[in-house]
Amino acid sequence: MTISMNTPIVAITTREDLRAVMAELMPVQGEMPPEVVELEKLKRKEALTTEEVEKLYNLNANTLRKRRLNGEGPAYSKDGEKVLYTHAAVRKYIESRRQKTHDQP
């Protein structure tokens, strides 16, 4: 059974029908590209390393380090040598860097 937006409504009367529908609608985790799986895991973490921020938010890790040394950049916590950023701090930083164009109020 192949399901698409044009597929008519089908009555699910047996467990086999249900399994077939679920198999069409819910991808198997092994079928997801590893990059997607990694990004989804990063989205669920409470705090991110500099390298993880780079992967998830596309902010250069070296730029983050330089800004941190200059007292700029997103707020962070430090545990020994480990630097951690929260998602909220990174989003706030990105929003603060937003530039308005001439047609925006």
Image (tube, helix red, strand yellow):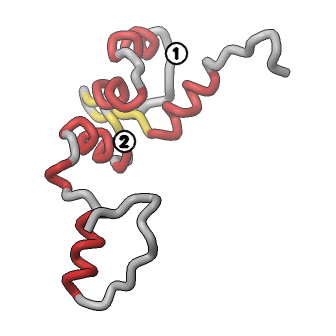
The answer to whether residue 95 is left or right of residue 38 is right
In front: 50, or 5?
A: 5
The residues tagged by marks 1 and 2 sit, at their Cα atoms, a distance apart of 19 Å
Which of the marked residues, 1 or 2, is nearer the chain's N terminus? 2
Task: Provide residue 84's location: percent of width, then percent of height.
Answer: 35, 34
Q: Is residue 47 above or below residue 65?
A: below
Evaluate whether residue 83 shows in this view: no
Quick one: quadrant of the C terminus?
top right
Q: Position of residue 70 (x, y in %)?
A: 47, 9
Look at the image and tell me whether residue 19 can be seen. yes
Q: Quadrant of residue 42?
A: top left
Q: Residues within 10 Å of mark 1 (few under 14, many from 20)?
A: few
Q: Which residue is mark 2?
A: 47
Determine whether the residue tagged by mark 1 lies in a helix, strand or loop. loop
Determine crowd level at label 2: few under 14, some 14-19, many 20+ residues with C-alpha closer than 10 A. Answer: some
Going by the picture, which residue comes out furthest to the left? 30
Q: Secondary structure at mark 2?
A: strand
Closer to the camera in the image, 24 or 35: 24
Q: Nearer the viewer, residue 20 or 93?
A: 20
Q: Residue at x 25, y 89 (%)?
A: 14
- The residue that mark 1 highlights is 72
Apparent side of residue 1 relative to residue 62 in the rendered image (left or right): left
How far across and how far down the image is residue 95, in percent? 62, 27
The residue under the point 17% across, 49% down is 31
Q: Amino acid at mark 2?
A: Ala
- Location of residue 8 in the rendering, given as x and y in whole percent from the top left corner: 44, 71
Give the residue drawn at x 22%, y 46%: 32
